[in-house]
Amino acid sequence: MDLHHLRTHCLAKPGTTEERPFGPDTVVFKVMNKMFALCGDDPQPAFVNLKCDPDDALFFRENFEGVKPGYHMDKRLWNSVYLQSDVPETLVREMIDDSYDLIVASLPKKDRNTLESR
């Protein structure tokens, strides 16, 4: 997966916005103003930070060299996933989907209902 496909996959999710709150070189993908993915514009090395269930986070780190504790994030809940690594593209997409779903599940019911009606 490259950064273009990552961006396309993230923006296809309902209610997703793309912002740059940390400066011009860092892209943040949010749903209902809550971050679910962030990555840099630099393709070398291209990686994305994704929220993750704590048990899954450890599993992925133990089984893939391309998954590290989240860079500048809560290491218990976030992973940095390197896009040009041993992590299959299908798994990267699933990890993005899981991150999005974790954030949506944490939203107030009113916001979840707003997303479902889109």
Image (cartoon, grey):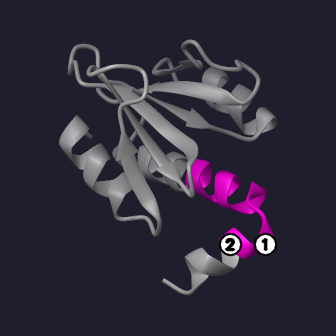
Q: Mark 2 points at which residue?
A: 112
For label 1, the SS is helix
Q: Do the residues labelled 1 and 2 touch (CB within 8 Å)?
A: yes
What secondary structure is the magenta-colored segment mainly? helix
Residue at the location (27% across, 20% down)?
A: 25
Q: Can see residue 2?
A: no
Residue at the location (22% across, 14% down)?
A: 44
Nearest the eye: 65 or 34: 34
Q: Position of residue 47 (x, y in %)?
A: 37, 24
C-alpha span from label 1 to label 2: 5 Å
Left or right: residue 105 versus residue 61 is right
Q: Mark 1 points at which residue?
A: 109
Q: Name the outermost residue toward the bottom.
A: 117
Q: Can see residue 43?
A: yes
Residue at the location (63% across, 19% down)?
A: 73
Q: Tell me if residue 110 comes above or below residue 99 in the rendering.
A: below
* Amino acid type shown at disc 2: Arg
Left or right: residue 68 versus residue 15 is right
Q: Tell me if residue 14 comes above or below residue 76 in the rendering.
A: below
For label 2, the SS is helix
* Amino acid type shown at disc 1: Lys
Q: Give the range drawn in magenta.
A: 98-111
Which quadrant of the view contains residue 40?
top left
Q: Position of residue 14 (x, y in %)?
A: 46, 69
Quadrant location, the N terminus:
top left
Residue at the location (75% across, 41% down)?
A: 53
| Neighbours of disc 2 within 10 Å: few (<14), some (14-19), many (20+) | some
Nearest the eye: 112 or 57: 112
Left or right: residue 40 versus residue 43 is right
> Does 79 lie within the magenta span?
no
Q: Tell me if residue 11 comes above or below residue 61 in the rendering.
A: below
Nearest the eye: 40 or 15: 15
